[in-house]
Amino acid sequence: MALLADYILTHLVYLSILVIFAAGVVVLYGLAGVFTLGHQGFMAIGAYFAAGIACLMPAGGSPILAAALLVASVIAGVGGAVAGGLLLTGPSVRLRGDYMALATLAFAEILVALIRNTEALGGMRGLDVASLLPRASGSARLPILGTYALASVAMAAGAVLAVQRLGRSRLGIALRALRDDELAARSMGLENRRARLISFTMGAGLCGLAGCLYAHFSGHVSPRDFGFVQGAMVLLYVVLGGSTAVGTVCAVAVVYFLDEGLKLRCFGLLTGGLGDALVNWKDAILAGLLIALLAWRPYGLLTANRLRSEP
Amino acid sequence: MSYLLTQLGNGLMLGCMYGLIAVGFSLVYGVARLMNFAHGEFFMVGAYGALFSAELPLWRWGNGAGATMFWTLVISVLVSAASGALVSVLVERLAYRRIRRVSRTATFLVAVGASILLQQIGFKVFSASPRGFPDVCTPVVVAAPTLSGWLQPSAGLPCEVAVTSQLQAVALSPSGTSAVTFVVLAFAVWGALFFVLRTDTGLAIRAVSIDEKSARSVGIRPQPAIVITFAVGGALAGIAGFLWSLRYGGVQPLMGFIPGVKAFVAAVIGGVGSVTGALVGGLLLGLLETLSFAYLPGEVSGYRDAVTLLLLLVFLLIRPLGLLGRQFGEAA
Amino acid sequence: MVRPRWKALVGSLGFFLLPLLGAGCRQEQQPVSRNEGAVDPAGSGKSVRLGAVLSLTGPAGTMGGESLNGLKLAIEDINARGKVHLDLRVYDDKTDPNEAAKLIQQVVQVDRVQAIVGPSTSPNCLRTGRLIQDLAVPAMTPTATNAGVTQSGEYMSRVCFIDPFQGEALAQFARKDLGFRSAELIVDKANDYSVGLADSFRSTFKKLGGEIVGEMTYSTGDADFAALIAKAARSEAQVLVIPGWYSDVGLMLRQAGRKWDKFTLLGGDAWDSPQLFELSGGNIHNAYISTHYAVDEPNPRVQGFVNRYIKVYKLKPGGFAALGYDTGLAFEDAILRAKSLTPAAIKDAINSIRGLQGVTGEITLNSNRDAVKPATIVEVLPNGYRFKTRISG
């Protein structure tokens, strides 16, 4: 039973981090209409800044120092990601569609390439993040894990609510208007630059926050964690979620369900040869299922509205 | 001086291969406005097709070692082109056709999904371990082939090693391999350019890339044009896959990912939608990579990837159409 | 977009919970008694569930694949002997550190194993070390040689020697046995193993009076080595030291053709794979590697293992196969001495392995839980290995 709880809590933390990351992308893509392929770059910035600050921790330092460094690392991570986002605001106004996607992708890949070649950042091998939080080991493992799970779920819920409120606010409506038809929106007096600035700040910030949490919880960061495929997966969640925060959470849940279901042989229902085939071919089957899902509901699992225009 | 020439040669060959993959990518984008992220996987499928055809003992006929080698190469080129084209058309039919008109983002995600799907299928069917491409240009060491031995790499040293006598006399040096590569590359590039610039089908394809509606109004049906473009692009990628594995050796399911990305960058730099642009972009990229590795000191040479991407970013910001690209009505 | 979709949210909670509960269902399928490792009432001895998380595919695929072959052979022998019964679950981490971390978690919490074999590669072990320590299940790696692997804590141990020693042995061989004064290093900077081994070679070689005239880097998985080969061909060194994995080195050697004929080549134990020959097309001259044993060693225990392996698998065993076999023996030894069959007790028993006679030599785990064994230097020929010398620590 303890092992099962362990398993659940660990997955809860990682899922929450994923939701926070996806919330950032909802702001960038869903609200502001930026076809972003580089959001994993923001997460990487958050993670590496957090890791860097954490490594300032001397061995056996006091808990107060640890707490201070923790706060500092989160601020640094989010701040760095926001700075990266601001960097992209300028170009994003001038580029459209596919070119925007390429530019963001280039941004993220340049970051990763730079990290890969910088020994001080651990290169391809990555950095171990010094534990600022108490380590979940030994007899205290479950309670500590439980606390982490609670905290991260709370943060994820907060992120989702915040993005939802943004979507319903004046700013959110303005963003969507600008996204759908810039000319018309501007003729109504809406200003592109300011809206973009805010959305990039918030979107990149959320991605950076997810990165910080990931660095601290998993204890290791490497360029492999922030690859193009991971970024595309999050975009998939947002698209399947109909570009809304709540929808994205549902999409994450559905994909997680499919992934784990296949891994656990359809929840123990299919045994023997067919079950084994499911496990071995899990990744291929999952990719096929996701393609089918997209073809079936390209505007989002919960959106039947075909009139909705896409960014 | 000879060092410079050697590295120039390396760079050109690498560049040509990137260019060949980029051409297919560029053509498809021009015709269908679709960034085909699965293009690298057509490259991979072509390489495996050539691998299997080269391993088939059928071609080891006793007509003389030279003839055997020649036919093996010819068959490998044809098989790699055919397998690349086949997979390409399949992906277009099954994955892209319906979603393309619906949503750009969804199409992109489907492309990524298709790429992953092909890689995963490759993992399962071919095994993820790298395979050596049988050196068709040097004496071949072959243990008795079985079907499973064919599909999966050998899991250990065979206890006895047999050398087939008919190829023993023939040993082409690596420069021979390079010569072969150059010849095939030249043919493929010439073929691609000829097809696009001089044939009627090529003209139709170019018409559809410029303006689909106008092309339709003069009676050109876009869908067959798109299918042909996918086929041609896939074939070129497949040939590039064969050449790559002939020259560099390793064949494994993920081999298409990085060359795919590099070709992608090359296509954008050269101008997406332009065939000559793709070739030029590929050459530039290959030369840049090789020469920067050759002449930069060890610690810095690793940054060449970052430099390549920075180049891409700069191009996107300053000249998104690339070097030779044309206005498609929705650039920056 | 504007209306709340609370129903959907509640529904998605179900999607989240089902897999987690499903994991629980899967656990129920395992009989609980096995986990406590009671003495099997059928009288076939102590029964333990082992989880193997190995790199069966990917750039280090034969490391896991061969060691699994050796391990399975050992388990056959052990189960036949009857005093210990090992139940093996095998998972493939595809040489990916993140996959290894996920699998370790799964194998401990869903399969509820009492001990782990693996991970295979140094990067994977370094990545999962902290996790293994936190999960408190003993793990023994058959093949990872980087020094940092066992530093994560007392739950991590290994059957092989460590890279600081291996690098020293290689440097000694190059400097003293072969008499070389200048060397060029070609390092895989994406790989902890390669970097660590290169570091230790470099420092020992310099200490013995040799000179490192240059260094070049590549990354795991690179395919095009043309530029690197041309650059290295210009080097003034007498020996090229390439402490990388066979999958990259094989391609490098194939592409090098005759350009590197003037050099002697030195490699580490990760060259020791049958795939090296396939990938390089047999294009290997003048090369020596340090590895864990020599297949032509006249020792009866070695020859017994080799013949048995050939009979079962029809292939010659490389160093990793021998290590896999010895890992099985190590588990048998530990379980026989363990006070109970909880993971903690097994861990203590493993850490006190002394004087176990294995195929790769005598295995004694020191206070860092590393095995102190000599390095075997073999010459690499186009179709196999030939024993050259042995260097002890």
Image (tube, coloured by chain):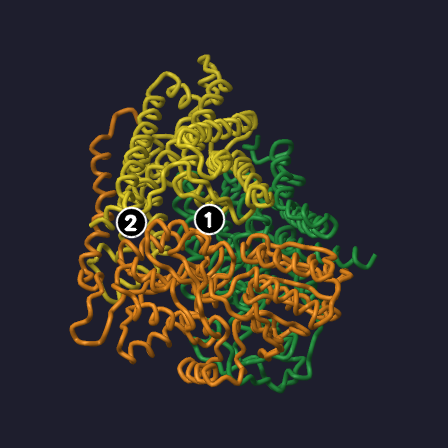
Q: Amino acid at mark 2?
A: Leu
Q: Is residue A297 visible?
A: yes
Reply above or below: A167 against B157: above
Chain that appears yellow: A
- Colour representing chain B: green
Q: Is residue A39 visible?
A: no
Q: Which residue is mark 1?
A: B223
Between label 2 and label 1, give the one nearer the viewer: 2
The residue lying furthest to the top in this view is: A189
- Chain at numbered mark 2: A
Quadrant containing the C terminus of chain B in the rendered view: top right
Q: Which residue is mark 2?
A: A258
- Could you give the CA–CA distance between mark 2 and mark 1, rounded to whole angstroms? 34 Å
Quadrant containing the N terminus of chain B in the rendered view: bottom right
Residue A119 coordinates in the image, percent (x, y): 59, 45
How many marks can you see? 2
Chain that appears orange: C
